[in-house]
Amino acid sequence: MLKLAHLHLLFFALICTASAQQEEGTRYALVIGNNSYLASPLQNAVNDARIMDKALKDAGFRSTLVENAGQVAFQSSIGQFLSKLGPSDTALFFYAGHGVQIENENFLVPVDFQPPDNLVEAKLKLFSVAILFDYLAKTRHKRTIVVLDACRSNPLGGQNALSAGLAQPQNAPNESFVVFSTGPGKTAADNPNGRNSYFTEALAMEIQKPGLSIDDVLTHTTATVSSETSSRQNPWHISSLKTTFYFHTPLNVEAESTASMAVKWMSDAKRFEQREEWEDAVDRVNQVIQKKPGGGLQAAAENRLGYLTARRDAQAAFDKGDYAAAATAYETAFKLDPFAIDAAFEGVNSYLLEAQVDQAVLLLHDIRVRGATESTVKAMKMLGELTAVNQPAAHEVGSAVPAPPPIEQMFSAVSFGVPDLEGGRLILAITPVDASRFVTEIEVLVPPVAPPADPAAATGAGGDQTAAMSQVLKGIFHLEVAATNETRDLAIRRAAAGSLDSNAGFLQLEGPDKQIPVLYKGQIQYLPAKLPLPAGKYEIQSWQDGKVVGTQEVEIQAGLPQIVTVKR
């Protein structure tokens, strides 16, 4: 299938730090903008190329601007550009125009391109992004970043039923930063009511700001594009960079790189871990350790390295068919991270493939000890299937669910009661959090009832709680809050500021009627009532004349408030 898109393709090379500036060589840029297509002309591509050319020249690039390049001019300008690059140089290539996807490969479209009769002819008339990557790799310049900005435009003029969007590049160079103006296979807007595409306009603006790393530039660009398109277009990127690139280098780049780069690498490692790209995750964690950031960040990296290495080795052994080695490595990973239940199940499967049923049963027992409810149910199902061939499995099935281990064993790297304030400040300095956006508000509708004649009497003389309880249970309309989720699953809570023993979140009951009493754990207070609660699910019961007349379930999350408005 031939997939078409209007795209903006941008290559950057990375600059390490200000201290290495004199060793970087020259910054070169080639900027191409194509509007005047024989079929399906564009209106913004040349303008996009012009604003990028200016922004890059202001950032110190020797930029060459080419407008409306046909096939010969296209290939010639790229050849001349590549011939300039030396080992220490920075290469930047920008392209605005049509792009096509053929069999999961991306191509750039010259303005004299005409609709082909078949895919082979199409490839001969286009310029392959994969070939461009190969050429850039052969020049051995410093580093490369790729940004693709695609839209819905169809250069074949609607002659074929084609879908827009670009494919994820399969051969991006090492030390590269690949950016899409939207997700792979998705479409991006050309901004028909403006002079520039949403993405290029935002990118050029951010490039001009002093002291921003390319990560910052793209974070800000993403926010702008998402806002301008009402979240229909969300830029996306992948990175294999090990150093920071600045269009305009800040004064104190070393201080920035020591802290924020280490945090970035740990974030990258987590993302690679979630994708099960174990080799890349190990590489990122090793980068953090080599950077020696100190404190909790370095300790976290050192603690995580063994687990990630075990997962990498387990996957490699499994792929080779060495199931015994894979099982051992998976079990090692599970011992290093008691929450890695998926590794434990992989280990069980590997043991079974090696017909080591006893070892599989032992590992299933460990899952029953450490796992949450869902995992223990799955383990029991597997054990049940093994009872016919294995006596230990039958014994395990007949035994009660083991008690979970002490929390200190599950979080062996955590110093309980000692908050990592330094780490928290570092994270907040790099990624500020607006806590107000986490407040959740819901409403509880209750039947109208007459308030007590003397609300003050509800607390009894001198605040006597026994008298208060008696009056509540006799019929005054009131609310009761009780926990509902008593399971073996963990509920994590954070200590509030200034008190290590306070609960993670709180439930705040509000309403216009200040005379409604609220009962929680035998204690009464009136609206508005603020109840500190451990994370978990709770049920708010409305009582009248000794009967429950309504219920509402709420969930309290660690560190987050929930506001419930009570209305009659």
Image (cartoon, rainbow, N blue to C red):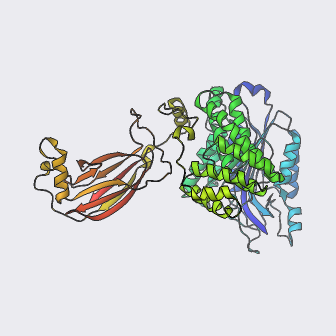
Q: Residue at x 71, y 68 (%)?
A: 163
Q: Does 424 sit left or right of 67 as displayed? A: left
Q: State the quadrant of the N terminus.
A: bottom right
Q: Residue at x 85, y 70 (%)?
A: 116
Location of residue 141 (image quadrant): top right
Nearest the viewer among 313 and 288 is: 313
Residue 531 locus on image (x, y percent) = 32, 46
Q: State the quadrant of the C terminus.
A: bottom left
Q: Please, is residue 11 above or below residue 549 in the view?
A: above
Location of residue 448 (image quadrant): bottom left
Q: Please, is residue 331 above or below residue 108 in the view?
A: above
Q: Does 223 sit left or right of 54 as displayed? A: left
Q: Please, is residue 360 above or below residue 55 in the view?
A: below
Q: Please, is residue 405 above or below residue 511 in the view?
A: above
Location of residue 291 (image quadrant): top right
Can residue 190 be seen here? The reply is no
Residue 36 locus on image (x, y percent) = 76, 61
Q: Residue at x 88, y 41 (%)?
A: 139
Q: Residue at x 35, y 52 (%)?
A: 563
Nearest the viewer among 332 and 300 is: 332
Residue 318 locus on image (x, y percent) = 79, 52
Can residue 475 be seen here? The reply is yes
Residue 278 locus on image (x, y percent) = 73, 46
Nearest the viewer among 23 and 314 is: 314
